Amino acid sequence: MNLVLVFLLSGIIACSRAKSAYKPTPRLLLVSFDGFRADYLKTYNLPYLQDFIKEGVLVEHVTNAFITKTFPNHYSIVTGLYEEAHGIVANAMFDAATKKNFSQFNDVDPFWWDEAIPIWVTNQWQENRTSAAAMWPGTDVSIHNTTPHFFMKYNRSVSFSKRLENIIRWLNSSDPLVTFATLYWEEPDASGHQYGPEDTKNMSNVLQEVDKLVGHLVKSLKVSELWDKINVIITSDHGMAQCSQERLIKLDTCVEPWSYRLIDKSPVAAILPYNETYVYDKLKTCNPNMKVYRKEDIPDRYHYHHNERIQPIILVADEGWTIVQNETLPKLGDHGYDNAFPSMHPFLAAHGPAFRRGYKRKTMNTVDIYPMMCHILGLTPQPNNGTLTNAKCLLVDQWCINIPEAIGIVIGALMVLTTLTCLIIIMKNRTPSLRPFSRLQLQEDDDDPLIG
């Protein structure tokens, strides 16, 4: 009988140990709604997104990389690098050595992307894992001779539902298992350019549609029984600022168009001058609402120096101003401005087994998203400019405490230790009382006691 009990107990212990040791393969879906300005969350009624946030975490403002444009920031998210480090320094680029040009319509040459290694590549290089992508910028390019195992070539006419359908199918049926996937959607960026963020009537309609897409995403994950198993990050690349016909900077009034080549446009214009000193001097006095930098003089906080693709002269318009050569206002909303402006900041919301529930944080950096994603997936990150420390409080497996709480705990601990020390000292110095019934000691000269 005892032997049977021993075997039963051993089996129970072994099973419990096996159960505690088992950990499901971590999985992550990264979603970007292009141009989703952080304060849209407070300005508009977005019930599906708010429900998503309530069950997970929210970073209210993500400080993105300069310049605050689509291609550069999407690559910063997935590499953890500033633009000068990963090489996608603008939406339009020119490489002087090779005479190559990059644009949103000519972006599949690996030459532009190979200065960094995005997370979908790292994910496939380590432990034979699989990545999938639905039109995230760069995922249809053979970066370091690698594309995601499943991907869709960019086609703006393909609906969100179709993109999501493919992602769900790949997550559910792939062998080996898809552990990292990305999903990209062009709104509310396209409408933000068209109407401007201050057109609350039109932007409300657009954002309600985006919110329904979030609801569609969550429902699809639940129906596929992925909702409780997969980690989901919803974020964006940049925000949006209101522009105006009254806030135009016309370069043709300052310098002759034949004296330079305009590589990238407003609100951060990249200038390739044919005579640098001449063009710089002309532009320097052009308009008080535009800062003019030689490449070597660009402020350090932009992290926008050390790459050959950054042009010799960079123009940075003040918020809401538009740089043109001699045109009228091309759009009512724009982005690309100084990344210190709150209007340029996106948000980040996340849900899943790796994330806390109901936690909010004020800010983090775009480059911090990459090390956080690598941590969730158990990947060894490539060298990057981010830090996991800034994302620790979002994660359930990380010890997190802020400075005021830490100070409170230290003060509380010191008070407890002080109190205990005082009590010990008091007890040691306390005079012991006489025992009430101590036995009498007889002296030698005492009479013999009476014996009854």
Image (spheres, rainbow, N blue to C red):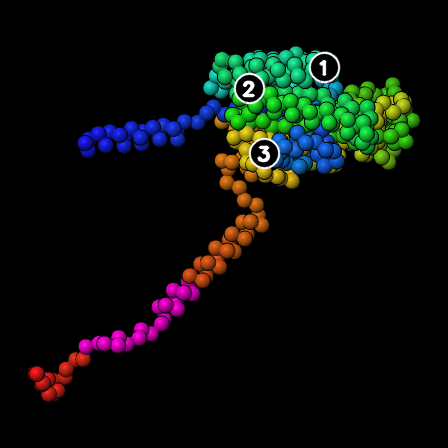
Residue 2 coordinates in the image, percent (x, y)? 19, 33
Left of 374 or right of it: where is 115?
right
Residue on which disc 3 sits:
55
Q: Residue at x 36, y 71 (%)?
A: 429
Using the image, determine if residue 111 lies above or below residue 48.
above
| Amino acid under disc 1 | Arg
Magenta-tinted stretch: 421-439
Q: What label does residue 311 carry, if any? A: none
Please tell me in which quadrant of the rendered image residue 447 appears.
bottom left
Residue 58 coordinates in the image, percent (x, y)? 62, 35
Q: What label does residue 156 carry, if any? A: 1
Q: Residue at x 64, y 22 (%)?
A: 216
269 inside magenta stretch:
no
Residue on which disc 2 sits:
224
Left of 143 or right of it: where is 315?
right
Sequence-earlier tag: 2 or 1: 1
Q: Residue at x 50, y 17 (%)?
A: 177
Which callout, 2 or 1, points to the residue nearer the camera?
2
Left of 151 or right of it: where is 201?
right
Q: Dots 2 and 3: beta carbons under 8 Å? A: no
| Amino acid under disc 2 | Ser
| Amino acid under disc 3 | Glu
